[in-house]
Amino acid sequence: MKIFRVQRQTEDWSKLDFEKFWNRSRKNIFLEYTKNKERARLLKQNMELWERLSIDYFQFRQHLKEVANRHMKFMNTISISDTWDNMMEGSCSDVILVPMDDDDILHPNIMPVLHDKFQNPQVKALEWKTWTYDSLRAKERFYVEPDPTPSNCYAIRGNCAKGLLVTHVVFAYSNIEREKLEDKLALRYVHRASTHFMQRERINPNQRLQKTDVIPELQWASGIIEEWRSYMSSMISARKLLHL
């Protein structure tokens, strides 16, 4: 059995600017702000706020991606385009795909769970629960993600995956049979560079963050959380004059 992390975003954020980002986004039919003028306007306003900081939006996103890549070294990573080019021909029943955004992380003990569950050939997909670390506003929060299927909480057998990798929303509302676990095997970072929230509300990337103690159940990710915190704090401490 082969298990792969499928990275949905494959760009080098450090080489993007807003124009390149926008042109790329327009081609993605799953992004709401490409079809909704009000959401597009709000996203652009939030992006402009980032342009006045010492660390710009694309530097921040690249850093989050690099942190996730370092943590996820225990799982082989492929891009979503590689998945279709190399793995969707013929039978892939012995290939397990775990689609994720490039800033998502998984519990390091997830591998034996995947091996164990997918030994059963009847299991087509597996779904687990996900913790969220939320630093979107003034005070941190830790909670179990209430969405039916967050971005990093499922795995699917290769021969069943067609059309179900590009976004977690498609998987959530698909009729594929899945085994659901109560285990919390992932961590999702809700941050101030999230386009999901930047298209819905005005976000202040410069707002100081009030820390909350990392809950015992997330001690396995405490080092990563501290790295996220430290980078956010350095960005705010080194900020340029920002009028909001």
Image (tube, rainbow, N blue to C red):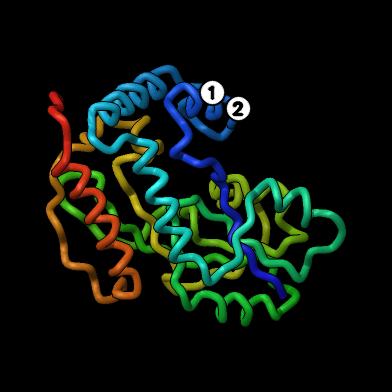
Q: Is residue 238 positioned above or below 135 on the image?
A: above
Left or right relative to 111: residue 133? left
Q: Check the image and report above or below for 224 versus 170.
A: below
Pointers 1 and 2 in contact (CB under 8 A)? yes
Residue at x 28%, y 38% (from the top left corner): 55
For label 2, count other residues whose C-alpha is less than 10 Å away and answer few (under 14), some (14-19) or many (20+). few
Residue tagged 1? 23
Image quarter in which the N terminus is found: bottom right
Q: Nearer the viewer, residue 117 or 87?
A: 87
Counting every numbered tag in the picture gives 2
Residues at marks 1 and 2, CA–CA distance in whole angstroms: 7 Å
| Residue 191 seen by the camera | yes
Residue at horizontal 71 percent and vertical 79 percent from the top: 120
For residue 73, side relative to residue 203 (left or right)? right
The answer to whether one can see residue 129 in this image is no
Residue under the point 60% across and 70% down: 179
Counting from the top left corner in percent of width and height, residue 38 is at 38, 19
